[in-house]
Amino acid sequence: MLTQRSFRDVLGCFGTGVVLVTAESDGGPVGMAVNSFTSVSLHPPLIAFCAALTSTTWPAIRATGGFAVSILSDAQEEVCRTFSTRDADRFAGGDWARTAAGHPVAADGLGWLDCRIRTVQVEGDHELVIAQAVDWSIGAGARPLIFHSGRYASLTERSRAE
């Protein structure tokens, strides 16, 4: 039987990376964890992610017109959990840097992108956000944080067949 739960379960079979989407708003830094992040285009440099219509954080980020994306390492699971929790003090502790636009980024992440929103379109129960990266940097050389089947995971090295 095709149900919303079974649809979610089958989508959970697809392992995704995890990022933080953050911005400096008039009320201070705001941010959320996102696993629906993807690249869209190299020229121009475009990315996309989806934000739930029920999100209380996304409207504050959207109002700034831009945001930063921090790509998380497998050592940042607790940071990700904090950013996934409602009413948490998400920026307490941790090592934070700022982009030229002033958006906070995880200083010890795998990399970051500073983005300007190009389009936002409602699709189902989410908003599809497409943004242009205007600045970026590669960070720590570590393994990515992966989300798979409702759990956090990390990659392991595989031997190559000779």
Image: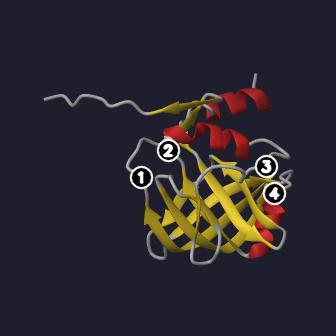
Residue at 18% of width from left, 28% of height from top?
A: 161
Of marks 4 and 1, which one's residue comes earlier in the chain? Answer: 4
Return the residue at label 1.
140
Answer few, some or many: residues within 10 Å of disc 2's Cα (few below 14, many 20 plus, some between 14 and 19). many
Answer few, some or many: residues within 10 Å of disc 3's Cα (few below 14, many 20 plus, some between 14 and 19). few
Residue at 44% of width from left, 69% of height from top?
A: 42
Answer few, some or many: residues within 10 Å of disc 1's Cα (few below 14, many 20 plus, some between 14 and 19). few
Q: Disc 4 and disc 3: Cα gap in Å?
A: 13 Å
- Proximity of marks 2 and 1: CB atoms separated by less than 8 Å: yes
Residue 91: name its quadrant. bottom right
Front label number (4 vs 3):
3
Give the amino acid at mark 3.
Asp
The C terminus lies in which quarter of the figure?
Answer: top left
Q: Which mark is residue 89?
A: 3
Eyeballing the image, is 154 above or below 72? above
Measuring from the top left, give residue 141's x and y in whole percent: 37, 49
Of marks 2 and 1, which one's residue comes earlier in the chain? Answer: 2
Of marks 2 and 4, which one's residue comes earlier in the chain? Answer: 4
Of marks 3 and 2, which one's residue comes earlier in the chain? Answer: 2
Q: Disc 3 and disc 2: Cα gap in Å?
A: 20 Å
Q: Residue 137 vs residue 26: left or right?
A: left
Residue at 58% of width from left, 54% of height from top?
A: 95
- Proximity of marks 3 and 1: CB atoms separated by less than 8 Å: no
Return the residue at label 4.
57
Q: Which mark is residue 73?
A: 2
Q: Which mark is residue 61?
A: none
Eyeballing the image, is 124 above or below 26? above
- Proximity of marks 2 and 4: CB atoms separated by less than 8 Å: no
Measuring from the top left, give residue 76's x and y in whole percent: 56, 42
Element type at mark 1: loop
Farthest left residue?
Answer: 162
Of marks 3 and 1, which one's residue comes earlier in the chain? Answer: 3
